[in-house]
Image: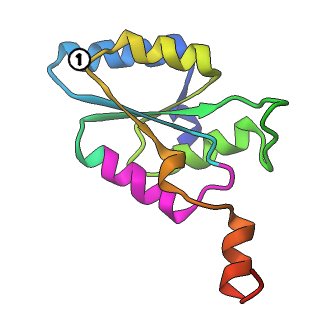
Amino acid sequence: MDTRKKILSLEEAKERMALATAAGKSCAFAQGWFDILRAEHAATLVQAKAGCDLLVVMVHADSDAHPTVLDQGARSQLVASLGAVDAVVICDEAAQAALHRSSLTASLLDAEEAVAGSVIDEVLRRHGRE
C-alpha cells in the first residue's frame, strides 16, 4: 500500500472521522513534530491506537518559529508508514484545534511529551559525552 494515501486534507480527515463516529467507532488524535521519528513516537502511537478504532495523527506544519530537520512532507510520510496510524493531517495550530473541535469525543495525545530530550542529547549520553 502506498502510505501517502493516508495523508489527508483537513476536510478529508473531518469527513473520515464523522463517518467513523456515525458508525459507532471511537476516534483519537495524536499531534507532534515527529522530527526525527523515534521509537518512542512509534510506541506512543501504537498505545494510542490500542484504545480506539481510528487514529488520526496531526503533524505540525513547517514553521519558521520551529525549524525542523525534515520538511512536513517527509515527516508526514514517515508517520503514515506506521501501521498503527490510520490517517495523517499536516496542519498548523488553528487547524489542529478545528479538527479536534470537529470530534469532541476523540481523545488528544501530545506525542512529543512521550519523547524526552533530543536525538543529539541521547547519542551523546550513550557515548559518555554529556
**Kind of residue at disc 1:** Thr
Question: Percent x, y for residue 66?
Answer: 78, 37
Q: Is residue 20 visible?
A: yes
The residue at 76%/31% (across/down) is 62
Left-right relation of 16 to 8:
left
Q: Is residue 98 above or below residue 13?
A: above
Prevailing SS of the magenta stretch: helix
Determine if the magenta segment contains residue 87: no
Q: Is residue 2 visible?
A: no
Question: Percent x, y for residue 110?
Answer: 47, 40
Left-right relation of 4 to 104:
right
Tell me which segment is drawn in magenta: 35-48
Choose between 97 and 8: the one closer to the eye. Answer: 97
Q: Is residue 120 above or below residue 116?
A: below
Q: Based on the displayed image, in which of its 4 quarters is residue 63 positioned?
A: top right
Choose between 124 and 30: the one closer to the eye. Answer: 124
The residue at 49%/45% (across/down) is 111
Pick out the residue farthest to the left. 24
